[in-house]
Image (tube, grey):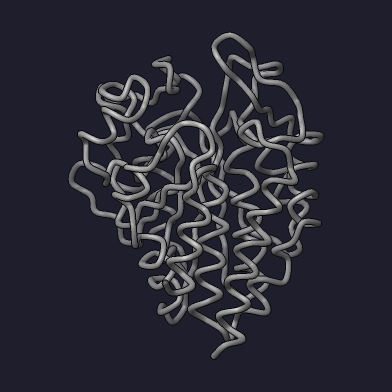
Amino acid sequence: MNAVDEIEKVVGRTVRRDIGRLVEAAEGDLGRAARSIAEHPAPHVGVICGFFVRHAEPPSPETDGLNGMGQLAAGLREAGVPVTVITDAPCAKAVWAVTKVLPHPVDLEVVAVDDAAVRGLRDRLERAGHPLTHLVAIERCSLGSDGRPHREHGWDISGDTAALDLLYEDEGWTAPWTTIGIGDGGNEIGLGKLPRRILEEDIPNGPLVAATTVAEHAIVAGVANWGAYGLLGALATLRPDLAPQLLKHFTARTEHAILDAAVHIGQAIDDSRVDRPGQLQMTIDRLPLEEHVEIIEAVHRIASTAIAAR
């Protein structure tokens, strides 16, 4: 097994609900996504994140997705790759809080919960002097079978969630950038690439909530953040010349700083379920920070070992 495949296996391990068939269906896409960035002569990576939960105390975005964005952006910027972070107004405070603790500045785009606003942003991104080459969505709710985004129990969240799917696909429009989607539940942007039957059968309320928005590369992880960690580690493995920069901030210290900013400044929440509203707490997908650090250390170790062996 090569290093990238090993990283894909580490980040794709099951946490609670069995995602085995989703992981299997996406096998190889982590490497293909990383290679598309590694081989580009002048990449500019957009990163979408923010999953807002009205049924929380306070109503806020989830912690999942925020650390993935932060770690990926920190590594790319250290390696000299421009990064544009994209979210919508309900998630803006938490996403902004994370960007402020990153070691280098990133561009931040915030849109209203409105299709026209998303299409307006899309036009600006396309006309930019150095337009995006890649777009990565991390734990961002996709449109379901009825054309609306839903939480996994079926609640319609279109009033709180901009259709950033329109940066991936739209009638009469084709994305000019390479699209990547990262998720852990099957209802996230990009995972519409996976077989419909598996999505509908393997996730709660699948026929309604399963992702319909397709990405060129779909990455499935036990926790969505881990997919971003895997992408960073795979990129470092493929670009050993940039690995010291890509992995410089890929540490427990950075992971703690990002989560601390997300929770205590951005008011990001976790553990939101139908029977128990989410709370401000230093966890991601109900897992303590230490378990996420273990994944970071495992990915870092695999990448570093592979690079040293060359």
- Viewer-nearest residue: 120 or 252: 252
Picture quadrant of residue 301: bottom right
Picture quadrant of residue 71: bottom right
- Viewer-nearest residue: 249 or 22: 22
Task: Work out whether 76 lies above or below 16.
Answer: below
Can residue 240 be seen by looking at this rendering? Answer: yes
- Viewer-nearest residue: 94 or 131: 94
Residue drawn where x is 18% and y is 46% of the image? 172
Task: Work out whether 14 lies above or below 53.
Answer: below
Residue drawn where x is 57% and y is 52% of the image? 85
Can residue 116 be seen by looking at this rendering? Answer: no
In the rendered view of the protein, which quadrant contains the C terminus? Answer: bottom right
Residue 303 image position (x, y, % from top left): 58, 73
Residue 98 image position (x, y, % from top left): 71, 47
Residue drawn where x is 32% and y is 42% of the image? 21
Task: Decide if residue 51 is on the left or right side of residue 103.
Answer: left
Name the residue furthest bottom. 310
Residue 95 image position (x, y, % from top left): 65, 42
Residue 267 image position (x, y, % from top left): 74, 29
